[in-house]
Image (cartoon, rainbow, N blue to C red):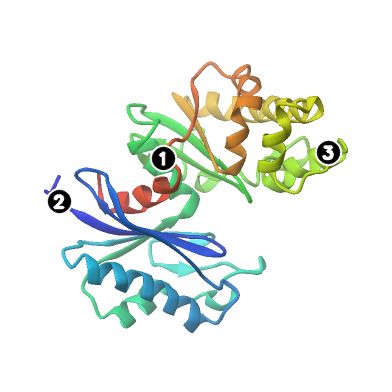
Amino acid sequence: MAENRRIIALDVGGSSIKSGVVDMTSLDVSSFDIIPIDSKGTAEEIVGTLVDVIQRHMNETPQAQGIGIGFPGPADYANGISLIEGVDKYEAIYGLNVHDAIKEKLSSPLPIRFRNDAEAAIAGEGVYGVGRGYSRLIGLTLGTGTGSAFLIDGVPQTGGKGVPENGWVYPILFEGEMADDVFSTRGLLKRLNDADVDVVTVADAVKQANKNEVIRQVLAKFGHDLGQFLHPLVTDFEADVVILQGGIAQGFDYFGDDVKKHLTIPVYVGKLERDAALLGAANLFGS
């Protein structure tokens, strides 16, 4: 590992960009920032915002050796081409080579590498966080959607024994519904609303759970179903550990035991929080 190797890292979301500079020796994330991005804006505006973020970090860290970007999918990550359409965000850059567009504006020799945003968060937590030391890891990000990654010795798998296509579980059916519609914020809120629980966010539900038996029952059933869903995936992949991240994971105290009942391996909640995806983006340049 190179001494004091620094990577500029971005975690691009639907409404904001988290960014920082990762020291790959100490794993410290410095110059952390979060700024809004208009994902419904023009291609020029979107690329301009990305360039502004990167340029600021380049000015502050002239010794940076690369730029790692976690970006929503679908995309051709190897070539940096966005393929997002039909989801009311980043429509303007569909088919655009974002890699080349950024390089042209930066006029910098720094290499730029992309990976899926969920994969970045899982890789960060799996390589540097609670997954450290495990060989075969399944990670899920439970939030707006159901992101996933299957890692072997820190390397994401897109196929092979026990790995769904691209390592994505979101289209897999659970009791006739896509996992993305069941194990996501909208799926959990639907369960709560169907149980006549009047909450707007998952965070609200978790805050009230200690004093609300109905919420606890809903969360327990969510955990039971998630454990059932994970069981064949864990078995087929021969996983050593499962890591859960995302907003829903904050309710793990109320549904974690029900997940574990279906599995014989450890299940952990990620601890790196905002740094996970930045470390995972920087990991594109090696550990």
The residues bearing labels 3 and 2 have C-alpha atoms spaced at a distance of: 51 Å
Q: Neighbour class for label 1 at 10 Å: few (<14), some, many (≥20)?
A: some
Which of discs 3 and 2 lies nearer the camera? The answer is: 3
Q: Which mark is residue 228?
A: none
Q: Earlier in the sequence, mark 3 or mark 2?
A: 2
Q: Which residue is mark 2?
A: 4
State which quarter of the image contains the N terminus.
top left
Q: Position of residue 241 (x, y in %)?
A: 46, 26
Where residue 140 appears, as percent x and y from the top left, is 54, 39
- Residue 40 shows in this picture: yes
Q: Nearer the viewer, residue 204 or 284?
A: 204
State the separation of the CA atoms marked 2 and 1.
21 Å
Disc 3 residue type (three-letter):
Val
Q: Earlier in the sequence, mark 2 or mark 1?
A: 2
Residue 270 x %, y %: 47, 35
Residue behind mark 1: 272
Farthest-out residue, left = 3
Q: CA distance from mark 3 to mark 1?
A: 31 Å
Instruction: Give the x, y percent position of residue 42.
Output: 55, 82
Q: What residue is at 67 percent from the left and 27 percent from the top?
A: 223
- Structural crowding at the residue carrying mark 2, measured as other residues with C-alpha within 10 Å and reported as few (<14), some (14–19) or many (≥20): some
What amino acid does circle 1 point to? Leu
Q: Residue at x 47, y 24 (%)?
A: 238
Which residue is denoted by mark 3 in the rendering? 197
Residue 156 in sight in this render: no
Q: Nearer the viewer, residue 111 or 189?
A: 189
Mark 3 nearby-residue class (10 Å; few <14, some 14–19, many ≥20): some
Q: Is residue 11 above or below residue 56?
A: above
Q: Earlier in the sequence, mark 3 or mark 1?
A: 3
Q: Outermost residue toward the front?
A: 211
Q: Secondary structure at mark 3?
A: loop
